[in-house]
Image (tube, rainbow, N blue to C red):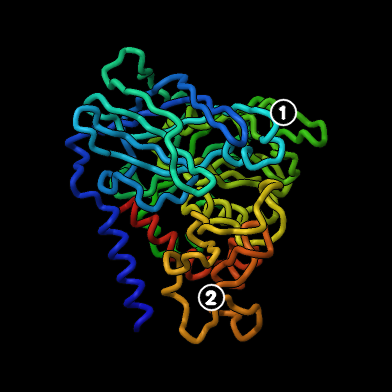
Amino acid sequence: MKNKFNVFLLFFMIISFCSNASVSFNDYFENKTVRMNYAIAGSAPKTEIFVSKYFVTDIWAGTKKHLTDCREYGPFRIDILDKISGILIYSQSFSSLFFEWQGLTEAASTTASYREAVRFPLPKSDAVINIYQRDSELKFQKIFTTDFNPSSYFINKEKNDIYPSKIIYGDNKTDNKVDLVIIPDGYSQNEMDKFEKRANEYAQHLFMFEPYKSNSDKFNIRIVLAPSFDSGVDLPGQGIWKSTLLDCNYWTFNMPRYLTTENYWKVCDVASCVPWDHVVILCNSDIYGGGGIYNYYSIFSAENSQSLEVFVHEFGHAFSGLGDEYESAGANDSYPTEYKLEPYEPNLTSLVDFKSKWADLVDKKTPVPTPKTSKYDSKVGAFEGGNYTEKGIFRPTMHCMMHDLQNKFYCPVCERITQDIINYWTD
């Protein structure tokens, strides 16, 4: 009963803190979506942002109640302030492919640029856009600011429903729903039926897992039937190149199985054919691979025998901000071996401030750190190993989908985090 009470208390505190009752959506926003396309460039110690273009589309599919993000599970954050009053009216944390590149060794001696975008509800009045990035102490530092005039005639308001779309799960109501859109890459015009079949399979598979299963009525899933010229995706390490709509490729950061796309502008163009909160990319390949970036996209090869499990794992990254719980080298080659701060991923801890993570779910009889023995095989604790390192970082359990795909479930901590995110989007 004590653990249940603690879980309820934590949940109540999160909801109370995140509600931001002082800001009313209807007071400050139109029911429309702004997308700011920008180039992000720099090196490991420096980041610069250059705005390219603004777009406005009908319907804001996101939450209209929880307008500020208190979780901050990502390395970046966007703030929207009312220009006259200075009131913070919207914020959202996120990650990006550029941030992952900044973790590479090469980023210390060279520069790169990526095409990225942020989305927010359309302000009724002039606003200020600020973007922050975490520093070496994990504190947010402002890296960009600009004024935004919602009446500017330079804002692109073209209709973007250039591809047909379908609802494959849920309904047309966007309020109080998680609106997922599944888009294809490497499926030719003759393979649109194949893509639609796969999308339906993965949509149904998601609801075999908790907490998605218990919250299936809170989801809408749409697909966009957007064909590519070629069938398949790029394999740079094998000299295979395809002309596809989203330019997806394996060998990201020279890792054969890391499947991503740098063309995020095009991802948003295709996704914006429908109202959406989160985008999932299905790639026409039978080679194992995928990726998930928080509040950015999840992506995976749709024709591999492990694709169903890869989807749920990568969606955990993109939707809930969950970190990888396995020990082996992963997304880049420069993870620290000593941790003096708490990682911002909610399912990882350095034990520096364990109470801010899942300490309330650990039985008093379970030692912290927790031995990896059969005695604690089904217990919540703090097991060393995670975030691609064997030492210094601890995960909640010995078994979880975020640790090993053979574990076809989220652990209690990852499940609770995901439930909280679902509540955030659907109130």
* Residue at x 61%, y 61% (from the top left corner): 325
Residue 107's disc number: none
Mark 1 neighbour density, 10 Å: few (under 14) some (14–19) many (20 or more): some
The correct choice, above or below, for 239 with respect to 201 in the image is above
Please provide percent x and percent y for residue 262.
61, 31
- Helix, strand, or loop for circle 1? loop
Residue 227 is situated, as x and y percent measured from the top left of the image, at 59, 29
Q: For the point 50% across and 87% down, which residue is it?
A: 365
Q: Residue at x 66, y 40 (%)?
A: 284
Disc 2 marks which residue? 381
- Mark 2 lies on a secondary structure that is loop
Q: Quadrant of the C terminus?
A: bottom left
Residue 303 seen in this snapshot: no
Q: Which residue is mark 1?
A: 242
The residue sitting at 37% across, 32% down in the picture is: 130
**Farthest right residue in view:** 238
Looking at the image, tell me whether mark 1 or mark 2 is earlier in sequence order: 1
In the image, farthest residue toward the top: 153
Please tell me in which quadrant of the rendered image residue 120 appears.
top left
Q: Three-letter amino acid code at disc 1?
A: Lys
Placement of the N terminus among the 4 image quadrants: bottom left
From the top left corner, tell me how far across and down residue 333 is, in percent.
Answer: 71, 47
